[in-house]
């Protein structure tokens, strides 16, 4: 990518093969993850407000593949293992990557490599948000973008905790997916007055927890429908703007506004995230810990990503265009398979 702009600024190119330096591992990439944030960064609208990476750049921050070489100081038994890893923010849309060996995460035998790649970013996000919100049995939980990569996982985790789940999405296929994954009610948040169905289902009380990944007017409508004493968890900004929730609004509504930024300070007891999962004290997790937990829950059969579409690596521009057109379902991956 030599400039910011529409999807077609992404173009295939040949680059030198990476070499494992001291403490590094080279991975032959089978799948590369795409996140919605990456489409925003490519368009020059980084939600972090940092202006995006220095150009030219290979985008992508998550891959799954096989270790082919290691550098000095790295256990050679790592070679040949199936792993997932992040790449430091860039470099993931490639056939090979070199990364710190300490950052690679083994993929359990029971988990397909494509599924593991889909769980790398979305799984850790969903596990972290679920841990933070701690839905309990009988709680009404609203999940925005319930047919997306993170949303579809949150539906499963909340339902597995005994919560009653409301899946909100903008098209029928995504609502059907949310229903198949355990949502008790689905709503179309593109329809004016969409929160009325939520208030009806909850007896006028509203949801105890809302996972807000959209922001903007949709997030604000969800916030206004919250039950007093509820938890409004901001997890994304798909609309391009964060939900406007001033402290006075939270006080007025008696709603606690929280988000992923609070995970590092979270110390309360973690809830079970699936049937048979043990409850244990929560610690401030790092991202790799959350990814390992997502993979473990998946290996136990209690969490499955929905991979709606896989594009060839050289079709990265088409993949970005599909995500921006809202035609994708669940997670989108790139593959190097020929």
Image (cartoon, grey):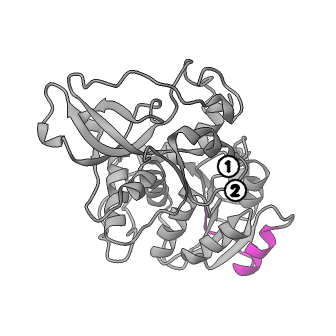
Residue 208's place in the image compared with 65, above or below, is below
Identity of the residue drawn at 35% across and 25% down: 17
Question: Which residue is denoted by mark 1 in the rendering?
Answer: 322
Per the image, the residue denoted by label 2 is 327
Q: Is residue 271 left or right of residue 204?
A: left
Q: Specify few, some or many for label 1: CA neighbours under 10 Å numbering under 14, 14-19, or 20 or more.
A: some
* Structural crowding at the residue carrying mark 2, measured as other residues with C-alpha within 10 Å and reported as few (<14), some (14–19) or many (≥20): few
Looking at the picture, how far across and down is residue 35, in whole percent? 55, 45
Specify whether 100 is left or right of 142.
left
Locate residue 38: give its quadrant.
top right
- The tag earlier along the polypeptide, 2 or 1, is 1
Boundaries of the magenta span:
194-210
Name the residue located 60 percent from the left edge and 58 percent from the top edge.
148
Q: Is residue 214 above or below residue 205?
A: above
Residue in the foreground of this view, choosing between 157 and 226:
157
Taking the magenta stretch, the answer to whether it contains residue 169 is: no
Q: Secondary structure at mark 1?
A: helix
Residue at x 63%, y 38% (from the top left corner): 317
Disc 2 and disc 1 in contact, CB within 8 angstroms: yes
In percent of width and height, residue 58 lies at 50, 27
């Amino acid at each position: 990518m030599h400039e910011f702009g529409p999807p077609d600024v992404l173009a295939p190119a040949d680059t030198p093969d990476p070499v494992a330096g001291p403490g590094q591992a080279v991975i032959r990439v089978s799948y590369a993850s795409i996140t919605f944030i990456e489409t925003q960064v490519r368009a020059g609208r980084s939600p972090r407000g940092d202006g995006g990476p220095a150009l030219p750049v290979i985008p992508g921050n998550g891959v799954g593949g096989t270790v082919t070489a290691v550098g000095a100081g790295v256990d050679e038994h790592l070679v040949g293992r199936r792993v997932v890893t992040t790449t430091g923010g860039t470099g993931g849309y490639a056939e090979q990557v070199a990364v710190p060996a300490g950052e690679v995460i083994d993929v359990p035998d029971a988990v397909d490599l494509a599924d593991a790649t889909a769980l790398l970013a979305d799984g850790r996000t969903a596990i972290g948000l679920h841990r933070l919100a701690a839905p309990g049995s009988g709680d009404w939980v609203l999940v925005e973008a319930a047919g997306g990569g993170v949303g579809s996982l949150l539906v499963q985790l909340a339902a597995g905790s005994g919560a009653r789940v409301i899946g909100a999405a903008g098209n029928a296929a995504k609502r059907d997916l949310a229903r198949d994954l355990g949502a008790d009610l689905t709503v179309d948040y593109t329809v004016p007055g969409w929160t009325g169905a939520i208030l009806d289902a909850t007896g006028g009380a509203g949801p105890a927890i809302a996972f807000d990944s959209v922001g903007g007017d949709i997030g604000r409508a969800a916030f206004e429908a919250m039950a007093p004493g509820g938890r409004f968890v901001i997890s994304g900004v798909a609309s391009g703007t964060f939900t406007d929730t001033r402290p006075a609004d939270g006080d007025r509504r008696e709603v606690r506004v929280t988000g992923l930024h609070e995970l590092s300070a979270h110390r309360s007891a973690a809830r079970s995230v699936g049937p048979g999962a043990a409850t244990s004290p929560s610690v401030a997790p790092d991202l790799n810990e959350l990814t390992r937990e997502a993979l473990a829950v998946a290996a136990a059969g209690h969490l499955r990503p929905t991979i709606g579409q896989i594009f060839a690596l050289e079709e990265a521009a088409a993949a970005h265009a599909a995500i921006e057109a809202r035609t994708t379902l669940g997670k989108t991956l790139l593959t190097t398979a020929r």
